[in-house]
Image (cartoon, rainbow, N blue to C red):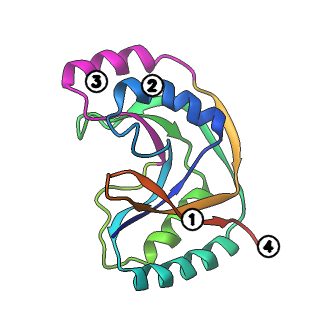
């Protein structure tokens, strides 16, 4: 079974992201706008119970933090992904590092660039047009993140919450 670890931003930021994702992201209907902390990985039911215990421990050792977006960016020329750039904070980087340390046997494909995807799998021309029109806009948004989620993938390709972890001591 496939699992992943994400942060879901507030409804306000999700609505803004979805206003673009409807047009530019073929995964729009499969998952809510999110910031990926741990890319999709395969695990058995037994393995995920152990991993959830570790995530609970990590959550209790980390505090709520501020998530801030300011602009649109792109992973071009590596791939045609357009996203809200999330300012990397010490807390966010630490949380990402701790979660991924649990899977030391899995190499990270890319360096951690905190972001919320709003467009992907675009042709070069479409990417150029969309990115060109959005990159000059200001997307100032700030909110407090106090939880993250372990997701699993359903047979139809969509993702749903397996468990939610609140940051800080409860």
Q: Is residue 167 left or right of residue 2?
A: right
Q: Is residue 139 above or below residue 107?
A: above
Does the magenta portion include 118?
yes
Give the distance between the C-alpha atoms of the residues marked 4 and 2, in whole angstroms.
36 Å
Estimate the x, y position of residue 148 in percent, counting from the top left: 59, 60
Mark 3 or mark 4: name the one nearer the start of the chain.
3
Number of numbered labels in the structure image: 4
In the picture, the disc for residue 170 is: 4
The boundaries of the magenta stretch are 114-138
Residue at the image point whose x is 64% and y is 71% from the top = 59
Estimate the x, y position of residue 61 in percent, counting from the top left: 68, 75
Give the distance between the C-alpha atoms of the residues marked 1 and 3, in whole angstroms.
31 Å
Mark 1 or mark 3: name the one nearer the start of the chain.
1
Examine the image and state in which quarter residue 139 appears.
Answer: top right
Residue at the image point whose x is 60% and y is 44% from the top = 9
**Nearest to viewer (mark 3 / mark 4):** 4
**Disc 1 on helix, strand or loop?**
helix
In the picture, the disc for residue 20 is: 2
Callout 3 environment at 10 Å: few (<14), some (14 to 19), or many (20+)?
Answer: many
Q: Which residue is mark 3?
A: 127
Image quadrant where one finds the C terminus: bottom right
């Amino acid at each position: 079974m496939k699992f992943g670890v994400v942060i879901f931003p507030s409804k306000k930021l999700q609505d803004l992201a979805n206003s673009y994702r409807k047009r530019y992201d073929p995964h729009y209907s499969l998952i809510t706008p999110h910031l990926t902390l741990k890319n999709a990985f395969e695990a058995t039911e037994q393995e995920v119970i152990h991993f959830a215990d570790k995530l609970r421990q990590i959550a209790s050792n980390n505090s709520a933090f501020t998530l801030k977006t300011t602009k649109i960016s792109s992973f071009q020329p590596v791939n045609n992904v357009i996203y809200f750039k999330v300012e990397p904070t010490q807390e966010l980087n630490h949380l990402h590092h701790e979660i991924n340390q649990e899977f030391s046997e899995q190499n990270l494909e890319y360096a951690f660039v905190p972001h919320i995807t709003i467009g992907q799998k675009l042709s070069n021309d479409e990417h150029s047009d969309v990115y060109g029109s959005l990159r000059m806009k200001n997307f100032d948004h700030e909110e407090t993140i106090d939880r993250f989620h372990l997701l699993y993938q359903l047979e139809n390709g969509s993702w749903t919450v397996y468990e939610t972890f609140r940051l800080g001591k409860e």
